[in-house]
Image (tube, helix red, strand yellow):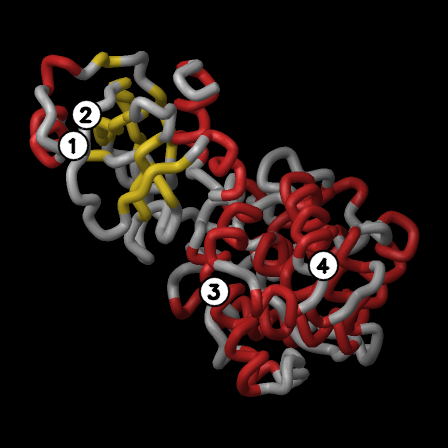
Amino acid sequence: MNAGANFADRLLAWWDVHGRHDLPWQHPRTPYRVWISEVMLQQTQVATVIPYFERWMARFPDLATLAAAADDEVMAHWAGLGYYARARNLLATARRVAADHDGTLPADPAALRELPGIGESTANAIVSQAHDRVLPILDGNAKRVLARHAAVYGWPGRGAVLRALWAQAGARLPAKRGADYTQAIMDLGATLCTRATPACGDCPVQRDCRGRLDGRIDELPGKKTRRAVPVVERFMLLWRDGSGRLLLERRPPSGIWGGLWCLPEDGATAPLARRFGLDATTLEHLPQVEHRLTHRHLLITPLALCSELDVGELGDGLDWFETGQLPALGLPRPVQRILDTTGRIP
């Protein structure tokens, strides 16, 4: 028996007893449900994803329903998960599959990789789990397990390191039970081979884990050199008209909170006020809200204005919204926090 098969046998035997068998996307494990779960799980933990997944399936139970949905409704069901390009790609893929693939997700990983937001690992994970095919994956958990077990040093974002990890992933595949193996290696990384304080004593593949034998588990996988996260100050206009409606602006399709409705914002008070013909001295500065993103730390100051002033001709992407309309919009998390904490919106 080769080393790869031995690794898989031990991992599957462990998973049969200790693995996660009741995740909502496993019952039933259809291509659509697996696809949605895999995209949601990119850079997001299972515990966070489960309630989002269940709400998503209640509203968009199949690909046809998703493809026909309005953009704002889809973004509203995603709001809070972050990395909003994932939601835009889900909708774009659903519409393309409805138009070009008779409404059925391709069962070929290469065809899946041609669709928005689906890379090699995600494509393999979808096909493996939905069709029980034996294919390698390299999500964050699998990278960590393989980097440690095979002692692959260096940051996985580097091409040479990533190629080495793909080779190790392929060498450890079982002959069958592709769906179970894919879930097993993800479960091992999520529950035992964790980033901090891994439970090596309980690991089914510990005896030939080179990282453990070398005493260098903490160095694996290698980390990217981190740069200081800049602090960015922003000002958001919290403007209600005489009827209590809130002025919102749709964000550009790319970039932070892409495609979402947001409070109008700028890097300074004066230009934001001038844009709407307001006197900056009439704007009430409310307590700052902090919001941390991967590459920046936002300090947001809400500027409150309750006025019957006419904003004039609304530009593209601007609109007034009744309070009852807001839950359906999927507002960015810091905007929702502003509305919740200021008490300015009933």
Q: x%, y% of residue 246?
A: 35, 30
Which of discs 1 and 2 lies nearer the camera? The answer is: 2
Residue assigned mark 3: 89
Query: Mark 2 or mark 3: which comes first in sequence?
Result: 3
Query: Mark 1 or mark 3: which comes first in sequence?
Result: 3
Instruction: Name the element at disc 3.
Output: helix
- What is the crowding at mark 2: few (fewer than 14 residues within 10 Å), some, or many (at least 20)? few
Which of discs 1 and 4 lies nearer the camera? The answer is: 1
Q: CA distance from mark 4 to mark 2?
A: 59 Å
* Amino acid beneath label 3: Asn
Residue assigned mark 2: 309
- What is the crowding at mark 3: few (fewer than 14 residues within 10 Å), some, or many (at least 20)? some
* Amino acid beneath label 1: Gly
In the figure, is residue 101 to the left or right of 113? right
Q: Is residue 193 visible?
A: no
Instruction: Name the element at disc 1.
Output: loop
Residue assigned mark 4: 185
Is residue 99 positioned above or below 182 on the image? below
Instruction: Name the element at disc 2.
Output: loop
